[in-house]
Image (cartoon, rainbow, N blue to C red):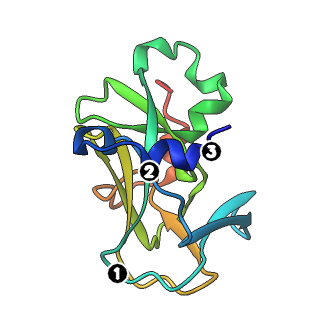
Amino acid sequence: MQSIFSYFKSFKSDKNNLFVTKPNNAIYVAISPIHGRGVFAQKTIKSGTVFEECPVIKMKLQEMTVRKHMLLNYYAFMIDEQQEYTGIALGYGSLYNHADDYNAIYYYDNEKELMIFEAIQTINKNQEITINYLGSNSSGQTIENWINKPEI
């Protein structure tokens, strides 16, 4: 029986490799003092380093008609400027906890269909990696106000 790693090694073209991610030894999941589980640095991650690229399950926002009552809603990202699509990031992507004083950012690569996570400051070994759920243009907004919006 062929292992999954030898299967991925058989890809030759760059086009196919856009959608293959590698095992990640820079991060791990553990119990978080912030909430439930969180993602932590396995080793020091320097500012500007992309430390995770996650495939995304993409869906139209209108398909989530009962969003407020869906558990997956709390793990979804808006993935386009028009707020037409949302997505669940695989890998550890949907396990990062929110912090107002975050140490990483995320963005969606539409061409590769990957959620990219990048350090914006040095993250020390065993430090929790946090993002701002509202995105980098959210100054003055709180996560509580966003969660309690009537349209959600």
> Which residue position holds label 3?
3
Q: Are marks 3 and 1 in contact (CB under 8 Å)?
A: no
- Near-viewer residue (8 or 76): 8
Residue at left 44%, top 50%?
A: 21
Residue neighbourhood size for the residue with mark 2, other residues' Cα within 10 Å, grouped as few (<14), some (14–19), many (≥20): some
> Which residue position holds label 2?
21
Q: Amino acid at mark 2?
A: Thr
Q: Position of residue 13 (x, y in %)?
A: 25, 42
Secondary structure at badge 3 equals loop
Q: Of discs 3 and 1, which sits in the foreground?
A: 3
Q: Are marks 3 and 2 in contact (CB under 8 Å)?
A: no
Quarter of image, res 118: bottom left
Classify residue 116 as left or right of residue 127: left
Q: Amino acid at mark 1?
A: Ser
> Label 2 vs label 1: CA separation?
21 Å
Q: Of discs 3 and 2, which sits in the foreground?
A: 3
Looking at the rendered structure, which numbered label has been put on residue 47? Answer: 1
Q: Is residue 81 above or below residue 127?
A: above
Q: Of discs 2 and 1, which sits in the foreground?
A: 2
